[in-house]
């Protein structure tokens, strides 16, 4: 992806095998969403969240809370991936409460550091990923 947006995108998304898997792969994102939808998703990431990347909070029996998305479920056990890309494995007996999140793991305001042209170029680029 292009700078400066590309540096931000691959912190959480993969493209051509590069980047991290915290959000959806961008390989064919332009075939899935049109330009307006892509812009809307960047401006308001919590408006439409892909189910596989929906945020959850695990309140563990050790008193700690962990947020991320469910990477894997195996019976009552689960693996949660946090925003740093770290996986946390929770056996069922260590989960006190599992709560769905209302906000996307993707932060709002990502376009604020870009010029209007950079933002337009980013949307054009993402739209072309088919």
Image (cartoon, grey):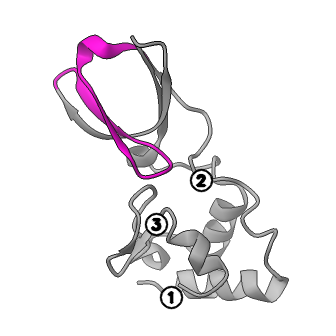
In x, y percent, where is residue 62?
41, 13
Q: Callout 1: helix, strand or loop?
A: loop
Query: Which stretch did the figure color magenta?
Result: 75-97
Query: Could you tell me which residue is drawn at 59 percent across and 53 percent down?
Result: 106
Q: Callout 3: helix, strand or loop?
A: loop
Real-space Cα distance between discs 3 and 1? Answer: 16 Å
Q: Residue at label 1?
A: 128
Q: In this view, does 68 lie above or below 58?
A: below
Query: Could you tell me which residue is drawn at 66 percent across and 53 percent down?
Result: 107
Q: In which quarter of the image is residue 19?
A: bottom left
Q: Residue furthest left?
A: 75
Q: Do the residues labelled 2 and 1 touch (CB within 8 Å)?
A: no
In x, y percent, where is residue 26?
44, 72
* Residue 13 badge: 3
Real-space Cα distance between discs 2 and 1? Answer: 21 Å
Real-space Cα distance between discs 2 and 3? Answer: 10 Å
Label 3 environment density (alpha carbons within 10 Å; few <14, some 14–19, many ≥20): some
Q: In which quarter of the image is residue 7?
A: bottom right
Q: Residue at label 2?
A: 106
Quarter the C terminus occupies = bottom left
Q: Nearer the viewer, residue 75 or 29?
A: 75
Whether the magenta-drawn stretch holds residue 113 is answered as no
In x, y percent, where is residue 58?
44, 24
Q: Which is more foreground, mark 2 or mark 1?
A: 2
């Amino acid at each position: 992806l292009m700078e400066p947006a590309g540096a931000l995108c691959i912190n959480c998304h993969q493209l051509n095998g590069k980047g991290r898997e915290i959000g959806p792969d961008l390989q064919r994102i332009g075939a899935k969403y049109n330009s307006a939808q892509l812009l809307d998703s960047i401006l308001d990431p919590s408006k439409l969240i892909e189910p596989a990347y929906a945020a959850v909070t695990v309140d563990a029996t050790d008193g700690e809370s962990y947020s991320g998305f469910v990477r894997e479920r195996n019976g009552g056990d689960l693996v949660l991936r946090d925003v740093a890309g770290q996986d946390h494995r929770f056996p069922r007996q260590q989960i006190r409460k599992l709560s769905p999140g209302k906000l996307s793991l993707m932060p709002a305001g990502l376009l604020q550091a870009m010029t209007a042209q950079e933002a337009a170029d980013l949307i054009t680029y993402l739209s072309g990923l088919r």
